[in-house]
Amino acid sequence: MRIDKNQLGDTNKKGITEHNQHYDFLGYTLTKKGKDVNAIVKKLQDFQVAIPSWALGAGGTRFGRFGFQGEPSSLELKIDDVGLIHSLTQTAGAISLHIPWDVPTDYNAIKDLANSHDILFDAVNSNTFQDQKNSKESYKFGSLSNTSKSAREQAVTHNIEVVKIGEKLGSKSLTVWLADGSNFPGQTNFQSALQNTEDSLKNIYKTLPEDWKMFIEYKPYEPNFYSTVIQDWGTSFMLANACGEKAYTLVDLGHHLPNTNIEQIVSTLMLKGKLGGFHFNDSKYGDDDLTVGSVKPYALFLIFNALVYGMENNPQNPYPAWMIDASHNIKDPLEDLIQSLEAIQEAHAKALLVDQKLLLKAQLNHDVVKCQEILQDAYRTDVRPLLQKARLNRGGALSPIDAYRSLKVRENLIKERGANSVASGL
Ligand code: RM4
Ligand code: MN
Ligand code: MN
């Protein structure tokens, strides 16, 4: 199934008068406050978030998985699904492949398909957290950090192969997330695990094409529950520095212990020019992979405030690669992703409203109350008409979820693919 712009025109008609009224009123208020509304809408239009190829089917936990009918059972169908999300939201203009879950067979055909949906290939992700069929070495006790040289070499070779796959698709970055760590005190020697990881990463790094970046992800725990080799941003930052200027830290929102000040981490990394990639999700307890903005929307806004500040003030930092990294246990994955994209753009738009000049003035005057007022004034603004405008300008849906339902997308997918088709991945 594909959604064409005419179909959207019809569904958009329903709410357009109300939208225009809301947009005009908001535009008037924001202009009075000195905001350039068109420039903000343009920034929202340009902001594109990659959808990971593993997020289009139902996720699950180790206690079970409840399938979702009409799941995409091939890479081609996954790209079609991203195409559907993109045509509705106009914010999902990229896909991030996970290797070996989604290895293309016919590269030209895959590129043409993505192109027909206006979708680019973002970072490619390696996987050394599972053993693949017929692989010589096991990652049970680690991959890049393994005490066995030949296990480390296998993991390095896999990463190099992932880059080769990405090159054929036009990707420009490799994301390395390691599950390496230990489950019990004494199981591992922290120093040699870290040293092995650094050496392995350097071996991957030195084969990286000139115009590529390597993103090093961190995570405090899971799947190992006593220690993780790259447990925090500091370790990732250190390893990225050890590798060189094309290596960066990747921040995944779910990879922090509760109450960590993520906006401060973002600021530190951007000041140092080392924030390369960003994974969106939300959580209550840990790496819960919940819909973005569903639990802590204010925290997301504060993080976006740091991101927007960094994008405006830190030319030393590259434009980060954005990706949603969530798992959908009970929702229709496509609806869930649409909700996440909406929450991302909402936090982004609110951050764009923060009056940075006034905030700086209040900070210099140590006017703490005013500082909070400035942030909360932006946060309390209902920016949804701006998001709608950005989508409409690009030919998307006024309300993506309503359109998804009224066009009966899932019903159509079930008809096309059958009730029992299952997506590969998580
Ligand atoms: C990890 C991490 C990675 C993702 C895998 C599937 O927790 O977030 O980015 O590739 O999950
Ligand atoms: Mn991640
Ligand atoms: Mn994760």
Image (cartoon, rainbow, N blue to C red):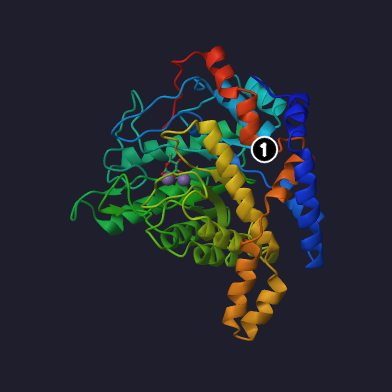
Q: Is residue 133 above or below residue 369?
A: above
Question: Measuring 61% from the left and 68% from the top, which residue is drawn there?
Answer: 375
Question: Measuring 68% from the left and 54% from the top, which residue is drawn there?
Answer: 383
Q: Is residue 106 above or below residue 144?
A: above
Question: Measuring 64% from the left and 26% from the top, which residue is drawn there?
Answer: 406
Mark 1 neighbour density, 10 Å: few (under 14) some (14–19) many (20 or more): many
Question: Measuring 42% from the left and 63% from the top, which residue is drawn there?
Answer: 260
- Location of the C terminus (image quadrant): top left
Which residue was labeled with disc 1? 399
Locate residue 267 relative to residue 109 in the image: left or right: left
Of residues 206 and 241, which is closer to you in this image?
A: 241
Task: List x then y, in percent, for residue 226.
Answer: 25, 53
Task: List x then y, in percent, for residue 46.
Answer: 73, 47
Answer yes or no: is residue 38 visible.
yes
Task: List x then y, in percent, for residue 404.
Answer: 62, 29
**Which amino acid type is shown beneath numbered disc 1?**
Ser
Q: Is residue 27 above or below residue 288?
A: below
Task: List x then y, in percent, for residue 409.
Answer: 60, 23
Answer yes or no: is residue 321 visible.
no
Locate residue 206 relative to residue 119 in the image: left or right: left
Of residues 358 and 118, which is closer to you in this image?
A: 358
SS of the residue under disc 1 = loop
